[in-house]
Every structure is written in structure tokens, then in C-alpha cells.
Amino acid sequence: MKNFYQKAPGSFVRYERRKDIQFFIRAILAIIFVLIVCGVLAFALSAIFWAVIDSWDVFNDGVSSEKNSLIHSHFFKSHNSNKPSACRKRLVGFFTENEPLENLETQFEKLTHVVFSFNEITWDGSVRFKSERVKNRYLRMRNVSESVENDVKMMVSIGGHGNSQFFTTLTSNEMNRGKIIDSIIRFLQDYNLDGVDISWVHAGESDKHNFVEFLKEIRTRFDSFSERNLLLSVTTPSAGIEGWENAYDIEAQKNYVDFFNVYSMDYNGPWPNQWGTPAGPMAPLYHGIGLRKNFNVDWTMKYYVCLAMDPTKFNIILPTFVRLWRNVEEPVEPRISLAVRNAVLKNGMAEGTAVMSRADAEDQLLDLKNNITWDDKFKSSYIYDPLDKTYLAFEDKRSVEEKVKYVNSHNLGGLWIWFVDMDDEKSSVLSSVYTDELCSRSSENVMKYHC
């Protein structure tokens, strides 16, 4: 053997390498075989598990006159607050998931409802926070709500832009609706929430019936929790723009919701298409020009209230952010108003920023305190700079006062702020709306619109 090693060392090495390779291949094949067997077993066990669950559901359906759930009322914390409300009308504050949270205590002391937006809905109907960071943000807000002297209701909004794509499937039949409703209730229980806002963006007319059934079944389940008055609200779109209101059977929905948050804005914006011109107020109370003659708060609110015949169910929107157009030139109809101006499109799109927090506006050195123009037809403020050809649309104290007058004179339920955490460091918009004029008396359910 000694001579062999000496005469053919290369052959011995190659022989050893072949043995190693063969062993490695056999090991890999064995691992693959084990994984396949485990996979088959896992699939079989999961199929058996879900079959048992399904049979359990069928059994429950057979022995109960109502849809049963693993959720029971004793899981809700009792919430019989003796704290006073901040306002006798609704003052609903929506908060984002990423803007800086400052002066929360001062803000919460002025609000009747705080809505955390938007939570994620998955394809299977699960409701969840988008991340651990977002969850911790909510928990911080929850703690503040418990520390303030007034009774502020904590709600969560589900859906919104970019997260409403599963609503159609999830509301298409009773079984699917039951799954998402179970998930909503679990979420409210787990995080000690007072209610949910449904923000189904771009619901279609074909969803109309299922939307009502969805709200009806939520209300039925909510009402089964006697120790907690759970709240249900719906965010509804502006009327008369693209027909999105046709998906909302307001006459039926009003029987199940506590209130509607009407998205009475976005009548003008620097959109990345041909509709990005003209520049103009984003939430004008009245008036409109040309094809946009009905693009205003009053037209939208009249449409909804005349269907429901209950003005106290409705809140109008109050945006805190700033909207910027660039390359803005002459007025569209100078004899009527200077507030609506042509914006030059580039590559078929308007240039500007549709949503800019007031902090970001300050960082860009945009002055929102000087050179403000008031348009009495629109009841709106704006700033137009003819040198820079920029146009700023935003709410100021005067426009907020007009919206408060409108709520009072039409017996509406209140206002909702979009978004509180996009206001400036002094919460100027919130402070302007939180006044005795708004909060000293509640609205009467008396129609003021001529329907």
C-alpha cells in the first residue's frame, strides 16, 4: 500500500473525492425525501384541521338562531365614562400613521372622537396594524385618551386609498362578511377601541346591496355587547364628481351607522392628469365654475341629507393640510371669480403637491399668514403669487368660521378634521373650529335644506 500511495497519490485523492460527492448526493436526496414526506403530512393535517373547523361552524349554524362566534361580550372592557364631552356637536379628529405626534393632550381635549387611520385589511378579512411601529403609535394615543379630562371616543378606520381592494370579495356573502366582522370585533376588543369607521374607497354601484348588509350585520353584532356602546361610522365620497356616491344607499345605511364622515373636498387639486387644472379652493362651501358648478360642500351635503332626511347624522370635512399648484396663470372666469385659475399642464399633468402638512409648508418657507385673498362666493381663502405663479389652497380662521356657521345653520352633526397631525404646531385649524359657537349646543334633527 505504501508503494501505491507513492506511485498514484492523484488517483487516491480523486477516489476520496468521488466518495465524498456520492455521500453528499445521498444526503441531499435523503433530506429532500424527508421534506416531501413532511410537506405531505402537513398538508393532510391542515386539511383535517380546517375540515373540523368547518364542521364545527356548520354545527354552530345548526344549533343557533344567530351567527355564532368565538367572540363573547365579556371580552369588552366596560366603558361607562362619567367624563364630559368636549363639544355638544361631533368634532372628529382623524390621525395619520406617520406624521409627528405633538400636543396630543391639548388636541384630545378639543375632540369628541379620535380616529386612527388606516388599518390594514388582508385578503382573508383580518384587520391589523401595518407594523409594530404603527401599533405603538396607536397605543400612545390610547394612553393619552385615557388621561384627559373629557370623554374622547377612540375609533379605528379601515380601508382608505390603497387598502380597499378586498371589500368587494369580503362583503359578497354572509360567510365572508362574518369573517371580517369577527376580525373587526376582535381588534376592537384587543385594543380597547370604541368603534370602527368604514372607509371603502371607490366602492362600485354593484356593491350597493352588500355594503348595506355589511353595515347591518356589524350593527347587529355591535348591539349584542350591552356593556359597551360601540360606534359605527362610514366615510362617504363627494357627490357629483365621478359617481362614487351611487354605491351608497344612504336611506338604508343611516339605520345602522352612528354618523357619516362626508369627504366634502378634493373639488380641485393638482392631479397628475387633465383634471389637475384649474387651481382653486379644495373644499369651497358654495359655488363652482363651468362643468364644476356643483363641486362644493353645499351641493354634496344637500344631496346626502335630502336622502337621509336626518342632518344630525352628517359631518363635513375640514382639511388641515396645504395644497400647492405651480405654473398657475390667469383666472378661468375673471368676471365671476379670481379664485379659480388655469394651471398649465406639463406632459398632461399638473405640477404641485396635493397634500402638504403645515410643518412641511413652513419648511419650504411658504407663508400662510400674509397676502391671503378671500373669495366670498366660495367662502374660501387662497394665496396666489403672480411672480412665482404658485397657488396655495388651505383653510384659515375665516374659512373655518364659515364652515362652523354652515354646520349650525343646517343642523349638521359636526365636523371631522383631516388630519389633526398635519396641522401646525399650534393646532391652528383645530383651535379655530373648537369654539363656543360650535360646541355650546347640539343640533336639532330639523331639515334646513330645500329638497
Image (spheres, helix red, strand yellow):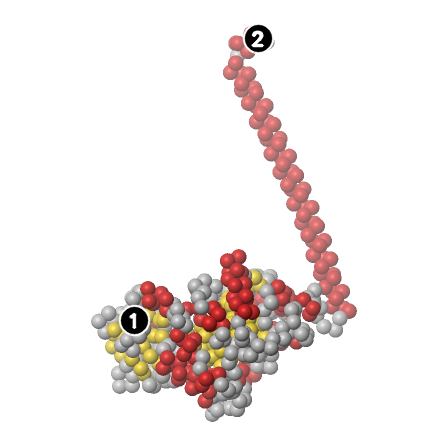
Q: Residue furthest top?
A: 3
Q: Is residue 427 above or below residue 408?
A: above
The three-letter amino acid code for the residue at tag 1 is Asp
Q: Quadrant of residue 83?
A: bottom right
Q: Secondary structure at mark 1?
A: loop
The residue drawn where x is 27% and y is 79% is: 331
Instruction: Give the x, y percent position of residue 385.
Output: 25, 73
Q: Is residue 19 above or below residue 347?
A: above
Q: Are marks 1 and 2 in contact (CB under 8 Å)?
A: no
Q: Quadrant of residue 329?
A: bottom left
Q: Residue furthest left?
A: 387
Position of 244 with respect to 36 (left or right) is: left
Position of 38 with respect to 258 (left or right) is: right
Q: Residue 50, labelled with which disc?
A: none
Residue 348 visible in rendering = no
Instruction: Give the x, y percent position of residue 112.
Output: 52, 76
Q: In whole angstroms, how far apart are the C-alphas of marks 1 and 2?
A: 94 Å
Q: Relative to the observer, which residue lies in front, 429 or 204?
A: 429
The residue drawn where x is 56% and y is 83% is: 251
Q: Residue furthest right?
A: 63
Q: Residue 367, labelled with which disc?
A: 1
Q: Residue 2, labelled with which disc?
A: 2
Instruction: Give the x, y percent position of residue 103.
Output: 45, 68
The residue drawn where x is 26% and y is 83% is: 334
Q: Quadrant of residue 222?
A: bottom right
Q: Is residue 306 above or below residue 179?
A: below
The residue drawn where x is 42% and y is 86% is: 405
Sequence order check, earlier mark of 1 and 2: 2
Position of 146 with respect to 78 (left or right) is: left
Instruction: Give the x, y percent position of residue 159.
Output: 52, 67
Q: Relative to the observer, which residue lies in front, 241 or 160?
A: 160
The three-letter amino acid code for the residue at tag 2 is Lys
